Image (tube, helix red, strand yellow):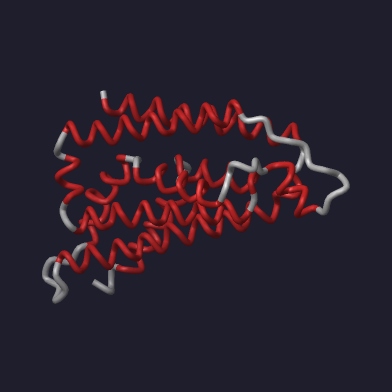
Amino acid sequence: MLSVLPVFIVTALMFAMLPGPDFALIVRTALIHGKRHALFSSLGIATGFSVHTTLGVLGLSAIIAHSPLLFNLITWAGAAYLAWLGIQALRARPGKPDKNASSEEQGRMGTEKPSFSPAKAFRQGFLTNILNPKVILYFLTFFPQFVVHDAEMSVTAQLFVLGVSCCLVTGGWFIFLSLMLSRVRRYFESETFRRWLERITGVIFLGFSVKLLASSS
């Protein structure tokens, strides 16, 4: 089991780095709302992934994947939520920072709506991940390849170790991404940039929504 863990971690990191709804959400949150909110979104993503891991270890992911009704319900809910995020981004009207305020205050005043709290950032990260049916398939197809059937550790225990490792890798990657994007955020404070970023991410979220719906047909 331990012999395959390093390979698993590297592969899991490569999968986590692939552009997807979680990636798009962190980019938008970090550049529009700042580091704190992006970190809460990252925590939400990691929490959602931990729920998927728990379902996988308990065997519930297989039940969901083999039930057309349950799988389609999650797919439709995920598509609807991504579409809602896309519409919200397209309708967003980023404010203009106050030039008399400090750079940190400008970031808060100019780019962060009062209604967008860390709790909401966490919720967006959690729902974006938990309503992604591809994470269920990821667990069912990727994890079994690293299970050693003749090991002293049981299959359930191995899946748990792999799941925890993957949660840490995924959460760590998005936390790292949040911190890196937050460092360069000050270079993209213009109202025009933020408006175009909202539009681009809005279209991306809508594209992911359509792709999810197409995959369920």
Residue drawn where x is 35% and y is 65% of the image: 165
The furthest residue to the left:
150
Q: Is residue 140 above or below residue 165?
A: above
The furthest residue to the bottom:
152
Residue drawn where x is 49% and y is 58% of the image: 173
Q: Is residue 167 above or below residue 152?
A: above
Q: Is residue 86 left or right of residue 16?
A: right
Residue drawn where x is 17% and y is 32% of the image: 68
* Residue 210 location (% of width, % of height): 40, 25
Q: Is residue 32 left or right of residue 120?
A: right
Name the quarter where the C terminus is drawn: top left
State the residue in front, 20 or 86: 86
Q: Is residue 130 left or right of residue 18?
A: left
Asked which quadrant contains residue 131, the reply is top left
Number of marks in picture: 0
State the residue in front, 171 or 155: 171
Q: Is residue 170 above or below residue 21?
A: below
* Residue 38 location (% of width, % of height): 56, 52
State the residue in front, 79 or 187: 79
Name the quarter where the N terminus is drawn: bottom left
Residue drawn where x is 58% and y is 43% of the image: 116
* Residue 25 location (% of width, % of height): 52, 42
Asked which quadrant contains residue 91, the reply is top right
* Residue 161 location (% of width, % of height): 27, 68
The furthest residue to the right:
100
